[in-house]
Image (cartoon, rainbow, N blue to C red):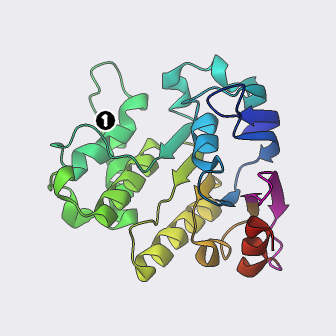
Amino acid sequence: MLLNAQNLTIGYEKANPLLSNINFTLKAGCFVGLFGANGTGKSTLLKTLSGFISPLAGQLTMNEQPLDSYKAAERAKKIAIVLTERISTPYLSAGEVVKMGRMPHTSWAHALSQHDLKLVAEAVKQVGIEHLVSQEIRKLSDGEYQKTMIARALAQDCPVLLLDEPTAFLDIQQKQNVLTLLGNIVQNTQKSVVVCTHDILFCVQFCTEIWLVDSHKQFRRLLNDGTISAEQIIAQICGI
C-alpha cells in the first residue's frame, strides 16, 4: 500500500473538524476521483494527505510509516501535489517552474543532471507545453498555468500525485486531454492519482475509485466497476 488512513479527522481546529471517520487504502495504480460540494473539506483532505497540514485525529501512514515521521524533503519524493493557489515567484519562466519539480531529488545546489533534464523534457512534452517554456509564469493564462503546474508535478516523479481542480480553467477538449493523460500515467506507470474536481462526467470515465463527501458531510469510498454514473454521484453529493 502507499497511503492508508484509519479513522482520520481533518480540519484546522479540533473543536470544529471539517471531516471525520475517513478510512481508505490507496494502492499503486489507483485513479481516484474526489467529489463533493464546495466547503466540505476536499482541498483540506489533499493538503493533509500531502503532509502540508497534520490530521486532527486518527492515523495516516505512507508505506506503513506515519506520514508525519517523514522529513519534508523525503515526503516530496513520494507525494506531489498541485494546488489552485499561484506560486509566489511570478518572474520565473514556465520551464524553470517545471524544473522545480526535480528539487527534492537534487543536492543542496539543485544542479540538474541529464536524468533530471530528461524527466523535465518528458513532463513538458506529456502535458503539451513545449511552446510555453520560455514564457514568464505570470503571463500565462489560467489554463496554461494549470498545465505548467501539472508538468512540474510529473517531473517530480512521485508514486502519488494529488491534484486540486486541475481542469478548472480548461476548455472541454483540454479537460478531456488532461484526464486522459492522467489516466494513461496511472495505467502505464502504476503511479496513484487523486483528483479533486467538479468534472464528474469526465472523471468518472477514468476513475478506479471514487471518494465523495455526501450531503451529510460523510466520507464515502466506492469502487468504480463501470456501473456508477455521474448522475448517481451527483445525487449522493446533493442528498437527492
Q: Position of residue 88 (x, y in %)?
A: 27, 37
Name the residue tied to disc 1.
Answer: 113
Residue 15 falls inside the magenta stretch: no
Q: How many marks?
A: 1
Whether residue 219 is in magenta: the answer is: yes
Based on the displayed image, in which of its 4 quarters is residue 129 positioned?
Answer: bottom left
Q: Which residues are magenta?
A: 211-227
Residue type at tag 1: Ser
Secondary structure, mark 1, is loop
**Quadrant where the N terminus is found in the figure:** top right
- Relative to 5, is 107 above or below? above
Query: Can residue 63 be spotted in the picture?
Result: no
Where residue 121 sits: x, y (%)?
Answer: 31, 54
- Camera-side residue: 119 or 27? 27
Res. 143 visible in picture: yes
Looking at the image, which is closer to me, 83 or 160?
83
Asked where in the image residue 10 lies, by quadrant, the reply is: top right
Taking 77 as reference, is 95 left or right?
A: left
